[in-house]
Every structure is written in C-alpha cells, then in structure tokens.
C-alpha cells in the first residue's frame, strides 16, 4: 500500500527566504505526482503536476522535482512572501491505482513579514 | 468556467438522518472523486468514477453511496448519518492526465 510522508509538518520562515518542502513515497511505481496548496477553510488548488517520466516542473517562483527511484519529491519556493502561507500537500497516483491519489498530511507553511 | 462546485457548503445533521451532497463540474472531465478530510488523517478517497454510469469504492467507502447518472454530476449519499461522518468533504474531477481539480468543500457536522 502506497504511503506518502511530508516533512516537516510545520515550517515558519521570514519573508524573502528560499525554502524546500519534502515529500516521500514508499512505492516508486507512480504515474504522476501532484503538489497542491490549501488555504484555511478552502479547497485544494493544484500547483504543479509532474509525470513519472519528468524530473521537474516550474511555475513562477515554484519548482518541483521528482526522483522516482528514491521515492522523493521536493517543492522549492523562491523568495517567499506572506501570501505563500498555506498548507502544501503532495499526492501520488500509482501505476496500479490508476487515477486515484494518495495524499500526504501536508506541510503547514507560515511566512512572517 | 465555474470549475468544480459543491452543494451545500455547510450542513448539520442529526444521527440517523440522510442527505445527498452534490458535485458538479463544467470541464467535461471523465473522472470524478469524493474525499473526506479529517485532522491527523489527511485526505482519504471515499468513492470515485471513471465515467458516466460507473462508480467504484475508494479507501473508506462504508456508510456512503454514490451515483454518476450524468457526466457532469457526482452525488454522494449518506443513508443514516453517524457522528464518525463529521468531516469536510471534497469533490474533485480529473482528465486523462490524471491531474485533479478540487471543489471548495462541504463542512458536515453530525450530532
């Protein structure tokens, strides 16, 4: 059974800092990996999708990498801003589970002005 | 494009009552999903559908039923609500790339 772990569970940084969020998964036979953002009391917003054949994806100040063989992904946020404060969730879809996603519990990020 | 919408946004039920949560998407997606989110448990898949007229069980299906009579709608039913079903429910839809798009959620309290 696929398990997804995100470390750290919470992170507090000053504005302007570059930071890395980590995601690991136990079964490397994945189809893709998706990073989401969730604001308090809101739904999930898709940030980046990395297909299993890709190594990284970029969107603005966000860069996500994937190392399938080691079961790891990182989300890099450059020049963090208070508006980046949210919970960041990582999810994987497996080659045997089709489109179904397995989620980590998330990293709660606070960026202080 | 409204994306994924969910009705209602909030609901309070008494134990034993029934209700239906409605999810609608206007992106012509084949795949639709129902999740629940609980503190310390993360997001867990309840049921999903890979196309109109199809449904399948996810990780935590007990106590729930679903129907997908139209491609754009996915209904989640609770026949006899229990306090353990107090949660935030999210619907999502997805295309063939398996990227998923989420609705705003329904906050359900069962007393």
Image (spheres, rainbow, N blue to C red):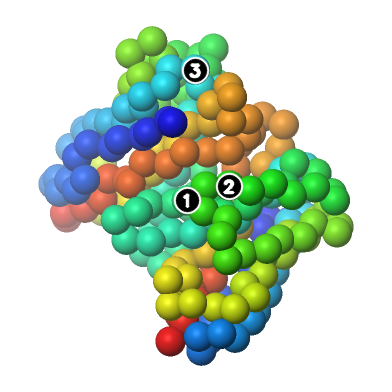
Residue picked out by circle 1: B44
Which chain is indicated by disc 1? B
x, y (%) of residue A12? Answer: 15, 48
Residue picked out by circle 2: B58
Identity of the residue drawn at 60% across and 42% down: B100
Give the Cα distance between marks 2 and 1: 8 Å
Identity of the residue drawn at 16% across and 54% down: A112
| Residue B9 vertical placement versus A19 (above, below) | below
Give the Cα distance between marks 3 and 2: 19 Å
Which chain is indicated by disc 2? B
Give the Cα distance between marks 3 and 1: 20 Å
x, y (%) of residue A84? Answer: 32, 49
Which numbered marker is on residue A46?
A: none
Mark 1 burial class by Cα count in 10 Å: few <14, some 14-19, many 20+: many
Mark 3 in CB contact with mark 2 (< 8 angstroms): no
Residue A64 relative to residue B73: left or right: left
Mark 2 burial class by Cα count in 10 Å: few <14, some 14-19, many 20+: some
The quarter of the picture where residue A98 lies is top right
Residue picked out by circle 3: A29
x, y (%) of residue B18? Answer: 64, 81
Mark 2 in CB contact with mark 1 (< 8 angstroms): yes
x, y (%) of residue B27? Answer: 76, 49
Instruction: Give the foreground label among 2 and 1.
Output: 2
Could you tell me which secondary element the residue under label 3 belongs to? loop
């Amino acid at each position: 059974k696929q398990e997804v772990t995100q470390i750290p569970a919470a992170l507090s940084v000053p504005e302007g800092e570059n930071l890395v969020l980590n995601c690991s998964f136990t079964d490397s036979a994945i189809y893709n990996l998706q990073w989401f953002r969730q604001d308090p009391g809101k739904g999930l917003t898709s940030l980046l999708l990395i297909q299993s054949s890709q190594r990284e994806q970029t969107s603005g100040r966000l860069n996500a990498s994937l190392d399938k063989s080691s079961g790891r992904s990182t989300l890099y946020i450059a020049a963090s801003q208070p508006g980046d404060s949210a919970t960041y969730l990582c999810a994987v879809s497996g080659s045997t589970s089709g489109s179904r996603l397995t989620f980590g519990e998330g990293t709660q990020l606070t960026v202080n002005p | 494009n409204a994306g994924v919408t969910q009705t209602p946004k909030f609901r309070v039920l008494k134990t034993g009552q029934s209700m239906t949560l409605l999810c609608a998407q206007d992106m012509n997606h084949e795949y639709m999903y129902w999740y629940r989110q609980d503190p310390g448990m993360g997001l867990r898949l309840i049921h999903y559908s890979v196309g109109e007229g199809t449904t399948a069980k996810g990780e935590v299906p007990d106590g729930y039923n679903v129907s997908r009579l139209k491609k754009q709608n996915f209904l989640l039913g609770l026949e006899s609500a229990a306090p353990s079903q107090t949660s935030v429910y999210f619907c999502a839809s997805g295309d063939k790339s398996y990227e998923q798009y989420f609705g705003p959620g329904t906050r359900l309290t069962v007393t």
